[in-house]
Image (cartoon, rainbow, N blue to C red):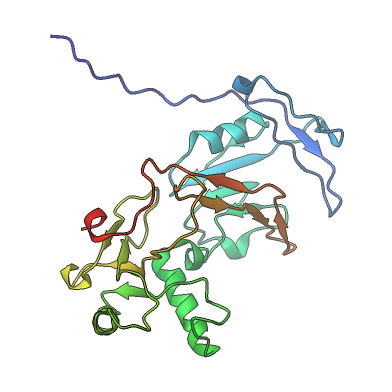
Amino acid sequence: MASNKNPKRKPVQETAGPLRLRHNPYGEPTIFFDYPAFLKLQRADPDSFAAPVGTSCSFRIKHVHEYNSVRNAFLRSGLYRTESKLGVHVSWDRHLDYLGKLQPFQRCNPFPGSFALGRKDALARNINRHRRLLKSDQRGEFAFFPDTFVLPEDRESLLQRAQSDKKRSGSDDDSQLPNFWILKPCASSCGRGIRVLSDPTTISEQKKCVVQRYIANPLVLSNGFKFDCRIYVLVSFSVVFVCGNNFLFCRSRASIRFECSCSTTD
């Protein structure tokens, strides 16, 4: 009997294209990245030009998940792949033990230490630390950040806060909506492992995760669906500056209108 499973698709690997550069008002010319061929579009850039004969650039991808889009962008733009650490022009490597030996012409990603912002547990520790240093309350500079606990180390603090909320619930002056908490893995993405709960005591004592107070009255679209916004920025490595994008990426992938009640959580 023939299997109805789709065969695994082999990753598409583009062939190396011509190396093109573009003028950089801040220094040496940079690499020009064109659109993929399947888009059937050509990126118009009057500042781009063909690299001088004999010019070559290389890239290296190690110790990270290799995305087809990243590898193909390098190949399509005229870079060739290498395993060399010291001679490579662009290094996409999580283990940069050779960071101190990089030359001015070399670039790396991700930045060493970026996990301090990229991991949910590290980000929570850093914001909570700054909140304590600045003696900021929920109405201060970090009002956007809900109560956050990193487990298992903050387990007792979480349970005490949850118990305190239960005692306050039902009082006339209580402005809090239902006492919900959202649990997230420390280092995951795409919504994997996230769940909403009303009783933090059900969390395993040894579980490593981040627990935040659930925002029970979020801003929603006019049709009642939740949404999120993202702004992409580029942080320079050699000369430190931040370049923002003028466009805001907004998406709504919800299939059910938002409703905060016990029947829709546990």
Q: Residue at x 54, y 55 (%)?
A: 110
Q: Position of residue 229 (x, y in %)?
A: 55, 52
Residue farthest along the top direction in this orientation? 1
* Image quadrant assignment for residue 8: top left
Q: Residue at x 56, y 82 (%)?
A: 140
* Image quadrant assignment for residue 210: bottom left
The tally of labels here is 0
Front residue of this view, candidates 200 and 22: 200
Q: Quadrant of the N terminus?
A: top left
Q: Quadrant of the C terminus?
A: bottom left
Residue 63 drawn above or below residue 82: below
Front residue of this view, candidates 209 and 95: 209
Q: Is residue 70 left or right of residue 175?
A: right
Residue 181 drawn above or below residue 24: below
Q: Residue at x 18, y 73 (%)?
A: 201
Q: Residue at x 37, y 75 (%)?
A: 176
Q: Is residue 54 left or right of residue 119?
A: right
Q: Position of residue 131 (x, y in %)?
A: 50, 83
Front residue of this view, candidates 182 and 95: 182
Residue 261 drawn above or below residue 78: below
Q: Is residue 136 left or right of residue 6?
A: right
